[in-house]
Image (cartoon, helix red, strand yellow):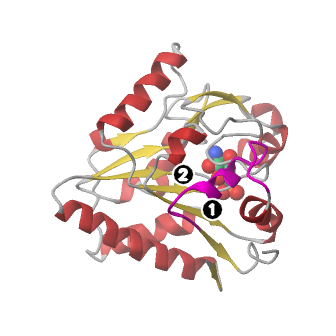
Amino acid sequence: RVFADRAEACRILAAELAELVASINASGRPAVLGLATGRTPLPFYAELIRLHRAGQLSFANVVTFNLDEYLGLSADHPESYHAFMRRELFGHVDIPAENIHIPDGTVTDIPAHCAAYEKTIRDAGGIDFQLLGIGRTGHIGFNEPGSPRDSRTRRVELDPITRQDAAPAFGGLENVPTHAISMGCGTILEARKIALLAWGEAKAAIVNEALSGPVTDQVSASFLQQHPDATFYVDADAGARL
Ligand code: GLP
């Protein structure tokens, strides 16, 4: 779905999400959301906060799972995804702290932590709605080229392009972590509904490749072509090559 601009795309998706959360809550269970970080979801989170303040969206019965976290960053590091989520969403809405799940970048037993993360998702009944951005390498979460379709939450190595893109935020490439913990492609594809956001001409080529190119582990977002309910929400610039 190509929108005139990102504000319109965010307004529409946020309204759709508010409705989904309300209908799942009305059926008597929590809504389970998979959340993303990066610059892309910022206007979307701002819209969710606006709806919350307007009394149109409550997170009181929402459970969240974030896609990923940098390895080696503790929750108080400003560039950690824990800090990002607090700053951009959780600090402004009524979500109970115990409902928030983000991989821990400081654990020593990474495989055990990843297995536990997967189990927590399963025990919550699976993800109802997964939000995604897309990296220049075509990654979703941190599933860099070569990530298998059936990959699960695990330790991943960041692509040089991804580290370069993160360098300004970290004040230099040398400060960007080399690894992360990320949900796998398989974890993401099990979500019942998926929305991928992309803005700006820098994303136009990779959006086109993900949607119209071959389904390949070299572009993990291309796996979404095979998902029964995945939608790309893009602005005119990101949709320019479709
Ligand atoms: C990081 C995140 C991804 C995100 C990507 C794109 O790699 N782990 O989830 O989609 O960046 O970032 P941005 O939205 O800033 O372009």
Residue located at (78% from left, 75% from top): 242
Beta carbon of the mark 2 residue lies under 8 A of ligand 1: yes
Residue 193 sits in quarter: bottom left
Left or right: residue 212 compared with residue 19: right
Residue 164 sits in quarter: top right
Left or right: residue 68 compared with residue 16: right
Residue 34: image location, x then y, percent = 45, 50
Residue 24: image location, x then y, percent = 25, 61
Beta carbon of the mark 1 residue lies under 8 A of ligand 1: yes
Q: Nearer the viewer, residue 63 or 175?
A: 63
Q: Which mark is residue 198?
A: none
The amino acid sitting under disc 2 is Ala
Residue 233: image location, x then y, percent = 60, 71
Query: Which residue does the numbered mark 2 point to in the structure image?
Result: 36
Q: Tell me which segment is drawn in magenta.
A: 214-231
Residue located at (55% from left, 32% from top): 152
Q: Is residue 235 above or below residue 179?
A: below
Decide if residue 29 is in sight here.
Answer: yes
Query: Which residue does the numbered mark 1 point to in the structure image?
Result: 40
Q: Is residue 131 above or below residue 52?
A: above
